[in-house]
Image (cartoon, rainbow, N blue to C red):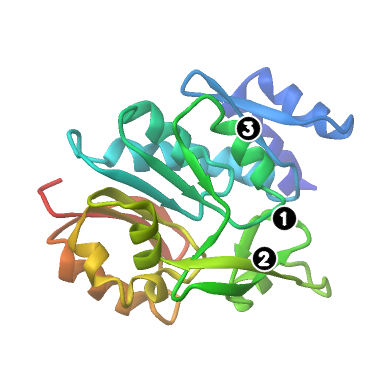
Amino acid sequence: MLGKIARLASLFKKYKLHAFHLIVNPLLGKEIWVKLAGKRVWLNFDSATYYHLIHSMDKVQVLVDAIPAGLRGAIVDGGANHGIFSLLASQRFPDSPIFALEPYHKVLPVLKKNIAGTKVQVVEKALAAEDGEVVFYTAPSSDQVGSTIRDNVVEFTDKGAAIVESRVPAISLKSFVKTQGISRIAVLKLDVQGLEFAILQHADDVLDITDCLLLEVVLVEQTALDLLEKARKFFPYHRILNQLPYGADIIFAKQPI
C-alpha cells in the first residue's frame, strides 16, 4: 500500500493535474497519453506503465540530447517499443532518415500512432544475429518487456505467470543496412534486452560506417564486458548518460563528446 501511495505521489509531482487523466482513463478503458516535446505521446497501459512514466521518459530525452549536432546519415532505433526515441530524434534531426525496428504486435499500433506525421519508417522486425525468425518472449503483465532471451523476461514476470512465446521475423544489422541502401549511420541505438552483443558481434562493417552508438549496458548480462569491449574498439569516446540498476545508458562516439 505504501508503495502505491509513493508512486501516486511521484506521478502527481511529475505530471501535476495531468496525473488525474493518467489514473482515471485506464479505469474507464481509455487510452492514456502525455505531452512530450510539444506532442502527445500515447502509451499502452499495463502494470509497468506508471514506473516508466515516472522514471523513463526523461531518460529517453537525455539520449537524444546527447547525440552530437551535425551528424549526417541514418538513425536506426533498434528495439523502438512505443517509438519515443524515434519521435524525439525526428524532431531534432528532421532531415535524417529514421528507422524504428520493433517486432512486437502489441506495441506496434502505439508506435505507429506516435510517429504519425514524421518521416520515421517502421520496420516490423527484430534486430538479431541472423536473418529469419526468432522466438520472442513477453511478460503477460507488461508490454514494456520483450526479448529473444527468455531469462530476461522471467525476472519481470509475476511468480507463477506463464511467459508468452511467439515467433517474429528477424534481420541482422548487416542485412538491414544492405536492404535499406544505407551508406552512413549517424546514430545506432540498441535497447534489445540483452541481445546487443549478438547483434554487433559480426557487424564490423556496419560499425565502421556508424558515427554514434547508444547502448543500454546491464552489467549482470553475461555478454556485458564483451559488449563494452566491442564498442570501445570502434568508438574511442564514451560518456555515461543515465545510471540504471546494475548498469547505464552509454553513448559511444568517433568524435569527442
Q: Residue at x 59, y 43 (%)?
A: 82
Q: Residue at x 46, y 58 (%)?
A: 191
Looking at marks 1 and 2 on the same chain, the residue that comes earlier in the sequence is marked by: 1
Q: Residue at x 58, y 76 (%)?
A: 149
Looking at marks 1 and 3 on the same chain, the residue that comes earlier in the sequence is marked by: 3
Q: Is residue 173 above or below residue 20?
A: below
Looking at marks 2 and 3 on the same chain, the residue that comes earlier in the sequence is marked by: 3
Instruction: Give the image location of residue 253, x and y in percent.
Output: 18, 53
Q: Residue 197, located in which quarter of the rendered image?
A: bottom left
Q: Nearer the viewer, mark 1 or mark 3?
A: 3
**Residue at mark 3:** 113
Q: Are marks 1 and 2 in contact (CB under 8 Å)?
A: yes
Q: Nearer the viewer, residue 57 or 85?
A: 85
Q: Is residue 131 above or below residue 41?
A: below
Q: CA distance from mark 1 to mark 3?
A: 19 Å
Name the kind of residue labelled 3 in the image.
Answer: Lys
Q: Horizontally, is 216 left or right of 237 in the view?
A: right
Q: Residue 234, located in which quarter of the rendered image?
A: bottom left
Q: Nearer the viewer, residue 197 or 61?
A: 197
* Element under disc 3: helix
